[in-house]
Amino acid sequence: MRERKDIYMTSKEKVVFWQGVSLPEFLPCAAGVTYADPNYHIRRFNSKFYVFEYIRSGTGYAEFGGELVHLSEGDAYILHPNTFHHYYSDHRRPWEKVWLNIQGSMISHLLSDYHLSFNCYIRGLSNGGFLDSFLDTMEQDPRQSKNKLALLLHQHISLFSEAYNALTSEPSAALAMKNYIDENLTRSLSIEELAAHVSLSRSRALHLFKEEYGVTPYHYFLSQRLELAQNMLSSTCLPIQEISNMLGFPDYRHFTSQFKKWTGVTPTYFRSH
């Protein structure tokens, strides 16, 4: 069996390391800002720490429960230790993000208390400033700022939990459909299934989505799939036929036709240039 290896393809980064006492309940290993290039790619098979990230600008992808999720400015996510971590930037709009790698039993207890004991993400977090404040504080005092850092992280987790639970409990129908599309880009998806997901009629679902986002669900779905296709063509060596299959297109010709209609060039031409 081939050995699984972690992959770290990094970009320009500002990194601050903790230099204070290492405590089992709270150890802020490192914090920083990543200015990703098109090849930025992180894959960890058995991470040793919690990862907190907030996207300042650009777009990228992260895997949650086997599903590849498109993330952009204002989105945030939490990844747990001893789990698979996989995320990378979009090659056309690489992201800039502030992040924290941390260990400790206090983090586990906090996330459990706030019902976030799993890898999760939130769209449009209203304030990612706590992670920026965490980074600034750690940079100013990398030895003695443990208590202040703990408070800032607690505030970030609290805000994240409030936003996450609000969106997952009672999202607007339009946002629920958009999230459902984003989470199912790699398979076929019909308007009937989308409408059923929010318990609406087909016509009502179409109307609400277009009213909120200015395009039909199909237009949004296709645009996101083809954006993902472009990313896969640029950042992987997968055969074009396999990419077409992975994204749920009915056949290679249909994929090529839609891709050319959207980008003006064929997948083959796009990859070679």
Image (cartoon, rainbow, N blue to C red):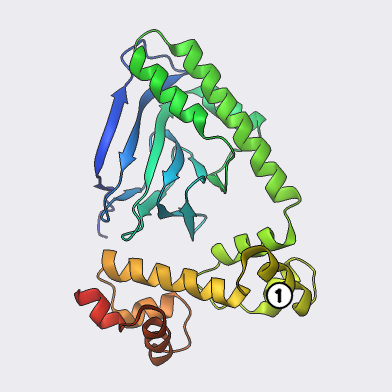
Is 267 displayed left or right of 162 in the figure? Answer: left
Q: Is residue 156 above or below residue 171?
A: above
Q: Residue at x 37, y 49 (%)?
A: 95
Whether residue 115 appears in this view of the structure is no
Mark 1: give few (<14), some (14-19) or many (20+) Cα within 10 Å.
many
Secondary structure of residue under mark 1: helix
Is 5 displayed left or right of 254 in the figure? Answer: left
In the rendered image, residue 247, in percent from the top left (x then y), is placed at 45, 75
Q: Residue at x 59, y 39 (%)?
A: 126
Q: Quadrant of the N terminus?
A: bottom left
Query: For the view shown, which residue lies furthest in the bottom direction?
Result: 253
Q: Is residue 84 above or below residue 242?
A: above
Q: Three-letter amino acid code at disc 1? A: Leu
Which residue position holds label 1? 206
Q: Nearer the viewer, residue 54 or 66?
A: 54
Q: Nearer the viewer, residue 134 or 9?
A: 134
Q: Is residue 162 above or below residue 119?
A: above
Whether residue 223 appears in this view of the structure is yes
Give the quarter of the image for residue 219.
Answer: bottom right
In the rendered image, residue 107, in percent from the top left (x then y), is placed at 53, 26
Give the quarter of the image for residue 100.
Answer: top left
